[in-house]
Amino acid sequence: MEHYLDVSALMAPEPLTRTLAASEALRAGEYLHMYHRMQPCHLFAQLDLRGFAYAMRSRAQGYYSVFIWRRSDPTAAAASEAARALPELTLRRAS
Amino acid sequence: MSRPAQPPPSTALLSLEQTPPLAVPLRFFLTAPLFGVTAALLALWLGPTAMISRWQSGVLAFTHLLTLGYLAMVMFGALFQMLPVLVGVHLRSALPLARAIHALLLAGTLLLVGAFLGSSTIAFALAVGALALGVGGFIAVMARALWRAQSAHDTVIAIRLALLALGFTLVLGLWLIAHHVDPGLGLRSTLINLHLSWGLLGWVAVLLAGVAYQVVPMFQITQEYPPRLRRSLAWWVIAFLLIWTALFFLSPRWTWPAGLALALALTAFALSTLRLQQKRLRRLPDVTVDFWSLGMLCLIASAALWLIHEASPGALPDHLFALYWGALTILGGGVSVISGMLYKIIPFLVWLHLNNRLQEAGQWQGNLPTMRQIIADRRARLHLRLHAIALLLLLVAIAWKGMFYPAFIVLLASFGMQAWNLLGALRLYRKTLRHAV
């Protein structure tokens, strides 16, 4: 199941803290789809430390989607991979 | 004894492995406005007749209080903070290194200023030593971290090129000091123009642009800068500066195309920044956005002024052009942009370190102050108003000496307000820790 988090209109450090909070709240089979206006390079080291895997995809008009799931959760990994493969128009964007 | 409950994940411990101790950048950031205060006091003490021409010792002293004591001071602190985080390289002995470099830059600036004012050979010699060690040492520390990192990030490339420009600026500066002592060395006025061009355009502008690629989207809630601009601006500026430098010696009549290219490149950056701000995702009033808008408009004005002066040298006497260009570039551009940046970076760093110190002490139940609470918005806005008024009065005072004292009194108040605001962030940090731990 996808949890969608739009942080594209938030100022640092809110995108980072809200994404980490939402990641920690993921249950089995769930992944997080984070939508941001910039590449969240400070996020990835934090996710590595907490045992999360992630993949980033460029979106239209310079935005980015980051898909985050627990490394120990293959169901979530598969679900996020399917979501990542969706065409741009089908993917969720700003709220 | 029961185990403390887990902290809420929204304030979970953030890895600070690469982030240096708060004292590292803060010592630079808190010193800078004090140099601004000193510069304003110096001008008030010297009076209008000692501040008419860029060649006067008072103007040289005032300029270096701002370029070294304010601009370089903040930029050194920003690089000590940003570089380890950006390139993932831990700076060993960051605090002792920062202390040493800070002390040398501080001492070197004061000695240089004293030497200009008193024409003291000993002071010049000591200034050369302190600045060579301080600035040279800083370049060496940063270059070593960059060498180990091998990063191709746009901001990192801009930092590399800006450090190269700082190296040129330093060498030219040291040579000029030596010439000040022994005028027989020749080529002085040519090298002064190269020194200030490499310093303001190569070091200050390229570094601020590189840092902008990170801090403008992060803190002004804009999209990222256009990829083409991010990848190429720093290279173009350094290339044009090299061409300009070569032409200065080989064929001075033909320096203007390189100068024109520099003006256009920096104007493109300013316009790009203004455009990003105009399309901000959350259009709430923000003092950092306003400082940067002012800074970008001054950058465009200084480029336009240079172009007009090249095309029509008789339109404005040389001595007035130099003062206007200096005021617009240093105070209007550099100080505005840095002031705006500090009102986001300092609250962010205070928040980050408080978050982690409180977590480590098991005090996660405590309320962390928000970014806006760390430095009150109305105080930051008062500083912005004072700064804008000071700039305007200063531009008037260049032509009309009757405005000299009002301009520098307001400038003194502006830097004083900034110092008070930034120290307030430190006071809040210490108070929050004392109550919580």
Image (cartoon, grey):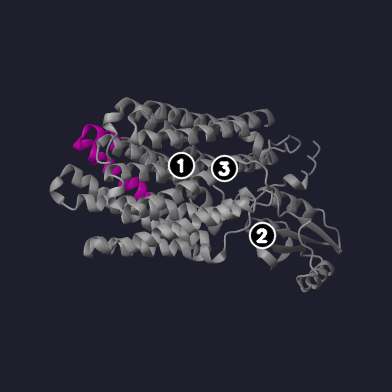
Residue B161: % across, % down: 42, 60
Left or right: residue B7 versus residue B98 is: right
Residue nearest the viewer, comparing A76 with B54: B54
Rendered position, B337 above or below B384: below
Residue B118: % across, % down: 22, 32
Q: What residue is disc 1 on?
A: B335
Residue nearest the viewer, comparing B99 with B106: B106
Which amino acid type corresponds to the residue marked 3 in the rendered image? Asp
Residue B285, by quadrant, is: top right
Which mark, by number, is residue B135? Answer: none
Q: CA distance from mark 2 to mark 1?
A: 33 Å
Residue B18 in sight: no
Q: CA distance from mark 3 to mark 1?
A: 13 Å
Which amino acid type corresponds to the residue marked 1 in the rendered image? Val
Mark 3 or mark 1: which comes first in sequence? 3
Q: Is residue B136 magenta?
A: yes
Which mark, by number, is residue B290? Answer: 3
Q: Pointer 1: residues within 10 angstroms few (<14), some, or many (20+)?
A: many
Which amino acid type corresponds to the residue marked 2 in the rendered image? Phe
Q: What residue is disc 2 on?
A: A44
Describe the element under mark 2 as helix, strand or loop: helix
Q: Is residue B332 magenta?
A: no
